[in-house]
Image: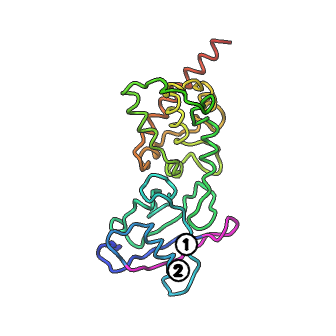
Amino acid sequence: MSQTAAASKSVKFIITRQDNPETKSYTEEFEIPYRPGMNVISALMEIQRNPKNAQGQTTAPVCWDSNCLEEVCGACSMVINGKPRQACAALIDKLEQPIRIQPMKTFPVVRDLVIDRSRMFTALKRVKAWIPIDGTYDLGPGPKMAEKKRQWAYELSKCMTCGVCLEACPNVNEKTDFIGPAAISQVRLFNAHPTGEMNKEERLEALMQDGGIEGCGNSQNCVRSCPKGIPLTTSIAEMNKDTTKHLFKRWLSV
């Protein structure tokens, strides 16, 4: 049975590494002194300060992405003990050892734990996940949202494009062009905005194209894995309903 960090004087890691996008991945073991309150990011920083593996050999520092360290930016997404999550929120005391760290396999690896999340940003561009305005001058306060709508829309706005939902989704892989649950949920968010609603049909059309909402297999892995607790499956269901309505409306207008 694996020891927990709380009961040991050191922390053991098995990290999947890759020198560049063209080379094969390999694993390397590390062991660092335990300190109370450590998270995975602070452990990686310790390895970076003294890049020696468990055998005492000097090695290249492990590369990873991070920014806010407060589970807001989404940059430090990685697979920790088999679960995609934010490394800054992964406390060593709550993880079984050896702690296995891998890059998210849904995205191309740049180096070690650094991944290319262009797939997500391309999807957001495809569904026009922003609210266009005419000019940069003062447009005034704008239309108000009903409080009930504002409350659930706020929950959708918590998305930090971390990629965890795509990693957990079995329908997002190198063989498909499915845009994933995050982009679909963002369509619901911007279509609910009084100004964003002007481009509602354009976004729905994007969801109806190849790789759009029809790619969802309803596994519901996304909503279970989302670190911000966003109701992704509810958004997918609502967008299924809206795209169906839009399709019938388009047929009837011919």
The number of numbered badges drawn on the structure is: 2
Up the image or down, 138 lies above or below 124; here it is above
Of mark 1 and mark 2, the one earlier in the sequence is 2
Specify whether 209 is left or right of 8: right
User: Which residue of the protein is positioned furthest toward the front in this rendering?
Assistant: 138
Residue bounds of the magenta highlight: 18-33
Quarter of the image where one finds residue 13: bottom left
User: Which residue of the protein is positioned furthest toward the left in this rendering?
Assistant: 7
* Kind of residue at disc 1: Val
Tell me if mark 2 has few (under 14), some (14-19) or many (20+) residues whose alpha carbon lies within 10 angstroms of its own: some
Q: At 58% across and 23% down in the image, what residue appears?
A: 198
The mark found on residue 51 in the picture is: 2
- Label 1 close to label 2 by CB (< 8 Å): yes
* Kind of residue at disc 2: Pro
User: Which residue of the protein is positioned furthest toward the bottom in this rendering?
Assistant: 56
Quadrant into which the C terminus falls: top right
Helix, strand or loop for disc 1: loop
Q: Position of residue 107 (x, y in %)?
A: 60, 55
Q: At 62% across and 42% down in the image, what residue appears?
A: 123
Q: Is residue 32 magenta?
A: yes
Helix, strand or loop for disc 2: loop
The mark found on residue 62 in the picture is: 1
